Image (cartoon, rainbow, N blue to C red):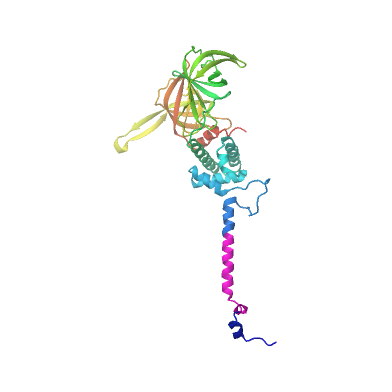
Amino acid sequence: MAALPLYLLQYTGVQWIKEDNPITGIVFLIGIGVIALFFVILNIIKNGIGSTGAKRSSGAPRLFSGMALHKVAYSYGLNRDQTKMLEHIFRNEGVSEPGQVIGNSLALDKHFKRAYKRIERFSNTEEEAQQQLLLLFSLRNSLESGAGNAGTASSTPQISANMAAVLNAGENSYHVKVVSVKGAQIFTEYPKNTLGNAVRMPRGTKVTLSFFTKSNKGFAYDSQVLGDADSGQGKTLQLVHTGRPKSLVQRRFKRRQVGINCSFRLVNLEESGSGRKKTVKMIVDRSRYNGTVLDISLGGCAIRTSAGIKAGTRLKIEFQYASSPLVAVLGQILRLNRSGTMNTIMHIKFLRVPGRAMNVINAIVFDYFED
């Protein structure tokens, strides 16, 4: 059969038999490729690198979600470096639910403590290690303060047995441990003076019992002394409180109760010159005093001492904790509280804290030294 002329094929509407323009096909394929690449990138952002579009089986571990992490980072006001550090930690630790981990201090510190150890062990230089630790603790404190500002607890906080507390009676403060709680009655260790002798408090004495919850929120009960009570752990002080606990002002930095021996020296200011040529030099006194750091944060500490020093005095404070290097900071006494008959508790604000000392103090506060 003879082939039909080309003009007849065109006339009868079957012009598609004719070879198409190759450029049109290339453009079409490129368009399909761009669309496919878009969905691949979207899937990576949502589920992390290594994810496929296949449905996850019920027993398989959840994939890391970069989108979820960046959403959480934004809500906590983290900067770019902090966000990158948080993503690095969570990817190494296999965290798939960033929001849940950040909301749980114990789980969060488990991951951060391992990151702290890795930085100390694998950093190329000491300077690099200190810079990475500064970023790590900057991130940890941002998460801590962000959690504190997220809102107040929906239910009344509970004080429980074995919880550390501070008993304030007049101008004196005593660190005690809660032995047991029965309704509105609280049984604590008997407060002791510096000599280790029990401090007797008459029935009806008005006191304040302060404590911190696991989320580092502080509360205080206005209470009265009912008297002595016997327990399996010896004689206890029986208190009764009325009403709900009062919320204490949220601290900027997390604070931890400790018992660290320290020494300190007075720092005096020496002025010279006048006008624009006036200079101020800090002179550290040679006399050295001893004390005990009772609690500490990145912003300050409380020191119990028998030295008679006035409020407003500047101090150079030195101490060492566990295997840490010597910490030396500059502080100023904000206020004083009597502790027993011979001792004073100095509440100190830090004025100057070197980078290495910051890392040591943060490691103490978040308990990263312990194994």
Asked if residue 9 shows in the view, the reply is yes
Residue 97's image quarter?
top right
Residue in the image at 56% along x and 66% along y: 31
Q: Quadrant of the N terminus?
A: bottom right
Farthest residue to the right: give it: 1
268 in the magenta segment? no
Q: Toward the viewer: 322 or 109?
A: 109
Q: Is residue 123 visible?
A: no
Of residues 370 and 69, the one drawn nearer to the viewer in this rendering? 69
Residue 251 as seen in the image, left or right of residue 367: left
View extreme (left): residue? 275
Q: Position of residue 137 (x, y in %)?
A: 52, 39
Which residue is drawn at the image coordinates 51% and 27% (left, top)? 295
Can you say whether 107 is above or below 159 in the image? below
The outermost residue toward the bottom is 2
User: In the rendered structure, does residue 22 fall within the stretch colored magenta?
Assistant: yes
Task: Return the x and y of residue 265 as percentages of the image width and height.
Answer: 45, 26
Which x, y percent locates residue 85?
A: 54, 45
Task: Look at 48% across and 33% down and name the residue there.
Answer: 152
> Residues in magenta?
14-37
Q: Position of residue 264 (x, y in %)?
A: 47, 26
Q: Nearer the viewer, residue 76 or 286?
A: 76
Residue that extends furthest to the front in the rendered view of this protein:
12
Per the picture, the main secondary structure of the magenta-coloured stretch is helix
Count of numbered marks: 0
